[in-house]
Amino acid sequence: MKRDFAALGAAHFDVLVCGGGIYGAWTAYDAAMRGLKVALVEQGDWAGATSSASSKLIHGGLRYLESYDFKLVKKALTERGMLLEVAPHRVWPLRFCVPVYADSRIYRLQLKAGLMLYDLLAHIPDTNMRHRYFSNRKFAHRFAALSADGLRGGFTYADAQTDDARLVLELVAGAMAAGAVCVNYCKLTGLVEAGGKPSGATVQDRVGGGSQVVQARVLVNTAGQWLAANRESRSWCRLSKGVHLILPQLLGDEALLLTAQSDGRVFFMIPWYGRTLVGTTDTDYRGDIEHVVVEKADIDYLLREVNHFFNTRLTARDVIGSYAGLRVMRQSDATHPSDVSRDWEVRRGSDGVLYSIGGKLTSAREDAAVIADAVCTELGIDAPCKTKGRAFPWASDDFAAWSATVFDQAGRLGIDAECGKWLVRRHGKRAEGVLREVANDVALAGRIVPGLPLIYADLLFCAREEMVVHLDDLLRRRMPLLILARLDEAKVKEIAMRVAERLGWDEAREACEARAVISGLGCSQ
């Protein structure tokens, strides 16, 4: 993946997609697979906002059954099943456990009915993926740390998990392999019109400076939260802030779905990279969309709920990392954002641009296909969608056999089993490139941070191959070290020094990038 700003001015494109989150990535990939000439621009890094601030789940949304949003749940569950099949390296099964207490808001029979419907909508042929019920004794044994006071039993059911930022990155890579020109740190500064219709846009290079016009017959805006600042689209959007915390390992291989005691809202506790991911909050947001922060009240809320269910005394000092993101939802009169539908729509503005409003990580592929259909209709092209059921760009032909081979190779190179598992999940068939790094230097098999399954060879491979512009890109989205570990100043400087040559940085740039990460700002600010 090589960044090439000049390529944006070297061709006339069929479609220019503005916004490099999950919807922009899927749209660019879908359109490129149909044979369209595609350009994709992102003002920051790929998945730099909401698409790297999710709960890392590919799921149907069990809680949406309460609001009778069966169509949305079925749509998401269908996509979940397809993604598990075509991208086993990128999307993997995750079993959730739901305790039932004497004072639970949803009683056992209600939950049983909901889970039966959830399985029915998913058309699950594999009995291992269906829900199960456990008595209080067996459920307490399954989660020994969970409070047993008033526990009546519990259910387990299946959903799936991913690394959201790497999901976006793989789709961008797939779009590029199909001929799309994709450039990060490239800001749209204005539209260009011809005959009263948009014919392109002016874009600014936020790395090398300068600007140019991108000629395109159709423009698509997938800018997520920035739609709320756009004159054309702001009235269509409602923003909700979601906060997640990273805590030490509190779980095994299974996740928990819990109902907050304070307000009855659902939140998750999820195993992720050997840590525990807790979230999310769901509050209306009207603040600065450029700087969405985790506030003390957000942390207090989530820790209070975790402590209630685990009989612990966790404080802010126990929080390893945190992040906040903004969900874009369709405008609604609902009192609370939790009651707003997560469904999606595409709208054409009076400026002639197609706008993507709302949606979910799980169902973004199907929605992007609708966007690409609209583009093809406008272009007068008959080109059907090719992404449904298609193996992902980094997927292997025979995942079981291939992954067994990779694990064996990794073990012989001194890479421990947990790191090997995450190499497969992070890179798919490109993991072989990381293994070659270790074969050339066995010291690169070492973990960057003890307790985290991320190795130095992975770091260097990402720096060289994955369009990294700033150190923050590498340490937050290519590998999420900044939220999974408390990196001290010495560690950040060491990492900057290791990757400087791969990224072509001189000593001044290396120092700037390290300072930017340490200060929490960024060289691009």
Image (cartoon, grey):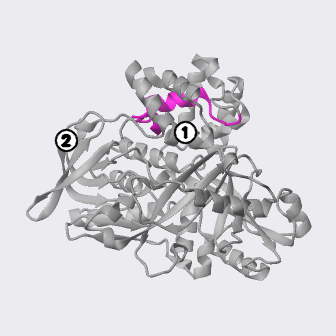
From where the camera sits, is residue 85 visible?
A: yes
Numbered range of the magenta stretch: 451-474
- With respect to residue 275, does 81 lie above or below? below
Q: Which residue is drawn at the image coordinates 8% and 63% (left, top)? A: 195
Mark 1 and mark 2 lie on one chain; the one further toward the N terminus is: 2
Q: Amino acid at mark 1?
A: Met
Q: Which residue is drawn at the image coordinates 53% and 35% (left, top)? A: 430
Q: Nearer the viewer, residue 444 or 421?
A: 444
From where the camera sits, is residue 503 visible?
A: no
Q: Position of residue 154 (x, y in %)?
A: 81, 69
Q: Secondary structure at mark 2?
A: strand
Question: What number is the disc on residue 479?
Answer: 1
Q: Position of residue 424 (x, y in %)?
A: 61, 39
Mark 2 nearby-residue class (10 Å; few <14, some 14–19, many ≥20): some
Q: Which residue is drawn at the image coordinates 76% and 51% (left, top)? A: 250
Q: Is residue 329 magenta?
A: no
Image quarter of the N terminus: top left
> Left of 450 or right of it: where is 481?
left
Q: Where is mark 2, residue-wise?
A: 211
> Left of 395 or right of it: where is 94?
right
Q: Residue furthest front?
A: 296
Q: Quadrant of residue 505?
A: top left
Q: Residue furthest left?
A: 195
Q: Quadrant of residue 375?
A: bottom left
Q: Amino acid at mark 2?
A: Ser
